[in-house]
Amino acid sequence: MSDTPHTPHTPHTPHTPDMPDGTASLAFAGLDPDRIPGHIARRIADARQALAALLSLPAVDWATLESVLGEATDRLHRDWSVVQHLAAVNDSPALRQAIGSTQPQVVEFWTQLGASAELYRLYERLDPATLTPEQARARTLALRGFVLSGARLDGPQRQRFAAIQARLAALSRQFSENTLDATDGWHYLAGEAEVAGLPEDTRQALAEAARADGHAGQFKLSLKMPVYLAVMQFAQDRQLRARLHWANATRASDLSPPDQAGLDNTPVIGEILALRRELAGLLGFASFAELSLATKMADSPSQVQDFLHDLAARARPAALQDVAALRAFASDNLGIDDPQPWDWSFISEQLKQARYRFSAQELKPYFPFPSVLQGLFRLAEGLFGIAIHAEAAEGWHPSVSHYRIEQDGQVLGRFYLDPFVRPGKRGGAWMNGIVNRWKQPGTPARLPVALIVCNFAEGVGGQPALMQHGEVVTLFHEFGHALHHLLTRVDTLAVSGIQGVEWDAVELPSQMMENFCWEWPVLQTLAIHAVTGEPLPEALYRKMLAAKNFQAGLQTLAQVERSLVDMQLHSSPAPDVVATLQAVNSRIGALPQAPYMRYVHSFSHLFAGGYAAGYYSYQWAEVLSADAYAAFEEEARTPGVAERSTGERYRRSILEAGGSRPAIESFQAFRGRAPSIDAMLRHRGMATAEA
């Protein structure tokens, strides 16, 4: 999650000087991929020199450690983060080549630094009594990090550990590139009859895409999520749904089309899992799952699996009722007596419309992106006592915007927003805390910078982008992560913002913000019809609210299923990926899985992200986030409207504290007690479900 002025010999380095208020200014445009290897090599050389200088000193205190080594490693981290970010949002052959030639040296440096026995001993010799509480926490986490990075290994084991780290980094990059290429490389030209039922704005976008490729009168379909989800939910043509379901489920796998055979992630996954097991063994862990949990709130794989099985048991009665209702509706109303995997989303949408007299498409005109964004900003300003201002800054694409956050006239940080889908951009949504708050003695605090990336469909015909309500939830989620990063008041680099927060607690602020997307007073500020300017009718809102927990049981089981697959792949000595998918589905799932299902082959959370043996974090953290949101519900002056005092207490207890203390302490500081699962079950409509 790292600044440096321009230097004469590298005129196209990633960064420009800091702004007068202490915020780091990032220059994304004009980055020459050919200069990346040389620039990063110099950063590595500077960091190595800094390490040598630090270790040569007769005595080292915390301030010396940060000023000598911290500055050099931070510059390397930040510059490399810019390069990796651009590869995720503006992929190109030149960037791939630059990263491929540079990454081994970057991984080698960080591996050697993390395994440095001399640096480990230096941290051990630091007297905790001379440190602030933040610094003491950072020292504790650093000592643990050294152990988990192999600082206690010797000889061949140390060498093997380093080799594994290098290979895993390369494999992760290969997995990500294969997934992106498999997604971008698939398309299908459909005729008018095939796209019957699709929303009009989706049809227009598909027609424009086909026309741009010289196929006027047809519709170009892709596997980008806005297109794929629209087809699965609304396309009346079963064959079209089946075609896209197969293509999406088999992306980057052994079942991909012949022209994508080189993108098969099967061997990549197998090697990653084997190397992770070996890495864990070198450190004395029985499995990679145990190693992963060493830095999380959960104590053991068995505790995680017990938690997931308990959640599944609570959700199963509702899920089975959901499936029975789907089958009956499909047979009685749609003429589908034997639903297949590509039918379920379509049946669900039709059933929801019939049951609630409501379709998600009715909401889209009320969620134009500019209105939603401003409503989100107003909510955050009211809750947390901040101000958000747009300002000019050069991004990496014309659709990227830039903002600063202030409190009482003081700038706290800045963020970039990249909202729309495009070729060469990794799918999904994420927040990257690319610059962290940091204050060294005698200098102003360097303020944080966040990057928020989503993949919403752009507007067509000159109209603003219209959002599904689920996409509104996604935007609120990622902004919650950004607030956690940007509102921190922690001065110690290693524990400011999201740094140092346990991975299974890091989703608390993001998921907490999602709850506001269902509150009538909040929606009144952001749901404005794109054409008429009329606010969202309360009657339509009531229908939306009634449908909120539609199929909550099924959705919960689906998340539990993926979490258990993750844990089993990282706990088993030699897992068969496809067999694991099928076994978990047969035991946990309420809907049968297609025999060709290969979703793990494009499951970037596990193999190109930070969620390996940690995907359960979304469910674990929702216990925390739902209970945190309950405080807003309990203390609201008017039902559904959070009090400013609650928001300020939440900001101080959780957002400002960052990783400076264990997450459970921050939660208890806010709630005054341990977390309870009751709020999560209530929010999902399962409060009365029996385990």
Image (spheres, rainbow, N blue to C red):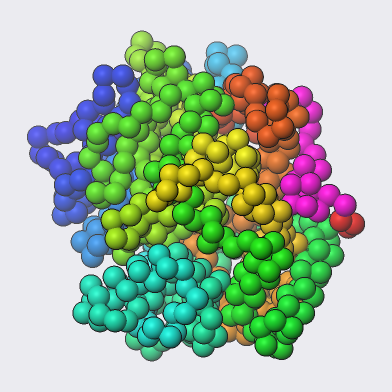
Q: Residue at x 23, y 65 (%)?
A: 93
Q: Nearer the viewer, residue 511 or 665?
A: 511
Query: Is residue 681 positioned above or below 524 on the image?
Result: below
Q: Residue at x 53, y 81 (%)?
A: 236
Q: Which residue extends farthest left?
A: 8
The image shows residue 102 at horizontal and vertical percentages of 27, 54
11 vs 497, left or right, is left
Occupied quadrant, residue 207: bottom left
Q: Nearer the viewer, residue 646 or 568?
A: 646
Q: Quadrant of the C terminus?
A: bottom right
The image shows residue 480 at horizontal and vertical percentages of 53, 38
Q: Which residue extends farthest top?
A: 442
Q: Quadrant of the N terminus?
A: top left
Q: Residue at x 29, y 71 (%)?
A: 209
Q: Is residue 676 magenta?
A: yes
Res 641 seen here = yes
558 vs 310, left or right, is left
Query: Is residue 474 positioned above or below 200 on the image?
Result: above
Q: Nearer the viewer, residue 241 or 352?
A: 352
Query: Is residue 563 positioned above or below 114 on the image?
Result: below
- Start-end of magenta stretch: 670-688
Q: Nearer the viewer, residue 424 or 103?
A: 424
470 vs 571, left or right, is left
Q: Is residue 324 magenta?
A: no
The image shows residue 402 at horizontal and vertical percentages of 32, 37
Q: Residue at x 43, y 24 (%)?
A: 387
Occupied quadrant, residue 6: top left
The image shows residue 437 at horizontal and vertical percentages of 42, 27
Res 572 seen here = no
